[in-house]
Amino acid sequence: MAKATREAYGEELSELVVKNDKIVVLDADLAGSTKSAMAQKVCPERFFDMGIAEADMIGTSAGLAASGYIPFASTFAMFATGRAWDQIRNSVGYPHLNVKIVGSHSGIAVGEDGASHQAIEDIAIMRVINGMSLFVPCDANETKAVVDYIAEMKGPAYLRLGRSAVEDVYQDKNIDVTKVHVLREGKDTVLFACGLEVQESLKAADLLKAEGIDAAVVDVCAVKPCDEDGIVELLKKYDQIFTVEEHSVTGGMGSMICEVAAEKCPRVDPPPWHEVIW
């Protein structure tokens, strides 16, 4: 069944806000689009529409977290991470406050919303914030699993969601979202993917199979902290590695894979120190 990850977020949050009286929900005048309105409907007393004021929303979320609440602050990914980056860094990240930032409509697949709404730098700029966890689920069930996970974990988290409906990859939400998952085995190459590019990578693997290339497909939901052991195991297995994401090539999930490769399993021994050109 095709469903947008933002819709799955709204469904799961509307259940959690009833079960946990510490959860509060904030939105920046986009509750209908981010689907946080589902939580507003069942628990209006713990829903706050902050208007088109993302920085204020994050600052208020930090205050609520410092008071013992678990804020879920939702808006479009472009505005959550772009307009409010200063507040996220200084008021949430460095104090390590328990704020969950949810950016929907990420990447370029936002259709008629246009270039001003296409967040293709958000993974990069959130990765560099000290203490920030970062998740990019690929379908409805994985989104619900992430929402459950970050609601229980302590500390700041960024959840990146899409606008468009995507086909199911997982049949239920019994998923360890902190680990990479091999969705398709292959002997020739491996495709690491996150978000809606997981489904596209599975399609690409079918096309490659028809050309005689057997490609594995790996879902990377947890970009930070990443599953280093799982990634290293796969990097050691394949000579050809591809990363697929709806993000700039700089600083995203692909950069994370390269960093893990360089630190944990470089393929070429470094030259003696005296051969290095400084």
Image: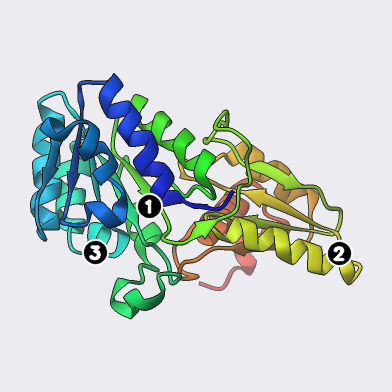
Q: Nearer the viewer, residue 97 or 141?
A: 141
Q: Which mark is residue 209?
A: 2
Residue at screen point 11% across, 42% down = 48
Residue 7, x across and y down, in percent: 40, 48
Mark 3 surroundings: few (<14), some (14-19) or many (≥20) residues within 10 A: some
Q: Which residue is mark 3?
A: 82
Q: Which mark is residue 127?
A: 1
Pointers 1 and 2 in contact (CB under 8 A)? Answer: no
Residue 49, x across and y down, in percent: 12, 48
Mark 2 surroundings: few (<14), some (14-19) or many (≥20) residues within 10 A: few
Figure coloring = rainbow
Instruction: State the SS at label 1.
Output: helix
Residue 125, x across and y down, in percent: 33, 59
Q: Amino acid at mark 2?
A: Lys
The residue most toward the right is 212
Residue 152 image-quadrant placement: top left
Q: Is residue 261 visible?
A: yes
Instruction: State the SS at label 2.
Output: helix
Q: Amino acid at mark 3?
A: Gly
Return the disc, 1 or 2, that comes first in the chain's sequence: 1
Q: In the picture provided, is 174 more to the left or to the right than 233?
A: left
Q: Between marks 3 and 1, how big is the CA–CA gap?
A: 13 Å
Q: Is residue 271 visible?
A: no
Which of the two marks, 2 or 3, is nearer to us in this view?
2
Which of the two marks, 3 or 1, is nearer to us in this view?
3
Q: Nearer the viewer, residue 273 or 106?
A: 106
Residue 239 image-quadrant placement: bottom right
Residue at screen point 41% across, 53% down = 161
Q: Amino acid at mark 1?
A: Arg
